[in-house]
Image (tube, helix red, strand yellow):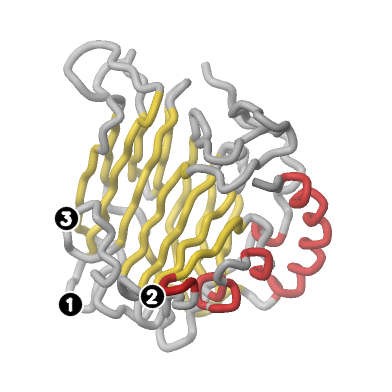
Amino acid sequence: MKTKMKENVKWLAVPSLLALSMGANAGFVDTFQTNQAVADNANTVVSSFVTGAGILNNPTNMNGERDMGVQAISGGVEGGGAAGCDHIADQCSKLVVLGNQLRFSNDAGVTGEGTVQWDGPDSSMVFDKDGLAGLDLTEGGVINAFQFTILESDLNWVFTLEVATDATHWTKVEIEATPVSAGSPVVRTIMFDSFENVALCGNPGATGDPQILSVTCGGANDQPVDFSDLGGIELVLNTPAPFDIGDGCPDGGNVTQDCLPQGERQVAVDMRIEAINTVVPEPSLFGMMGIGLLAFAGAARRRRQKA
């Protein structure tokens, strides 16, 4: 049985992890009510494309399309039966939408990467940066944040969220995953300003969110996305760490639950989240943020090592 994440996580109450109620206005990227599943154990991208209700769509479609792909980069095992992940002895990386949840799971010893795209009706894992045809995700300038509930998540792994207007105007943000013990759900809020503000391109520390590790923008790192003119969204799970992450990361350290060295991905990651919504966070978030940042600053400095 693989080692599960530490149960005693002391930094769940930082500002980026505050449990918040939604404002009066809210939309969605995906409610995860349309089921889908992909799995791999052969270091090959396995993909699937579904159209259904509760998925972000462009202005010309009633239902949106969700593209999903998964790859067991290392550690996959064919344990018996037909090729693929259909046998109890298979060791796989799996990406599943079921029961109004997105679930990313990797068996013991498996290092996998999962990708989810909301980029219009293309039936392809090539990210179409203008496939949503100029959708206004702000709903006239009202909506200003992503929000989702994390039901469970392991320690020390990284994901990227790229949001694009077109091929030249986009923002990709690398984020350290929020560690969450099963049974203690946490609401995660990510402000649109972290993507749209050109002053944050190449300057992740200015976002005020200690878990944002990097911010890269289109052009000469000076053409960020415009959420009122949205072309596509891509979420990639378990990407290489941009620098050493974790308190137990000496030089040349190996991947463990306490250490994710630069350029490495975490092994045996498990994660479950509920609907990805678009919201206006309650004003109380901003008053609490300053207090939380002070409490978190020391831990953030310890986690970040120079490349």
Q: Residue at x 43, y 80 (%)?
A: 138
**Distance between the Cα atoms at labels 1 and 3?**
16 Å
Residue under numbered circle 3: 123
Vertical arrangement, residue 211 with respect to residue 110, above or below: below
**Distance between the Cα atoms at labels 1 and 2?**
22 Å
| Residue 13 position within the rendered picture, expressed as x and y whole percent measured from the top left | 73, 53
| Residue 162 position within the rendered picture, expressed as x and y whole percent measured from the top left | 42, 62
Q: Nearer the viewer, mark 3 or mark 2?
A: 2
Vertical arrangement, residue 120 with respect to residue 110, above or below: below
Q: Residue at x 37, y 43 (%)?
A: 114
Residue under numbered circle 2: 169
- The amino acid sitting under disc 3 is Ser
Helix or strand or loop: what does disc 2 sit on?
loop
Q: Residue furthest bottom?
A: 140
Vertical arrangement, residue 199 with respect to residue 17, above or below: below
Earlier sequence position, callout 1 versus callout 2: 1
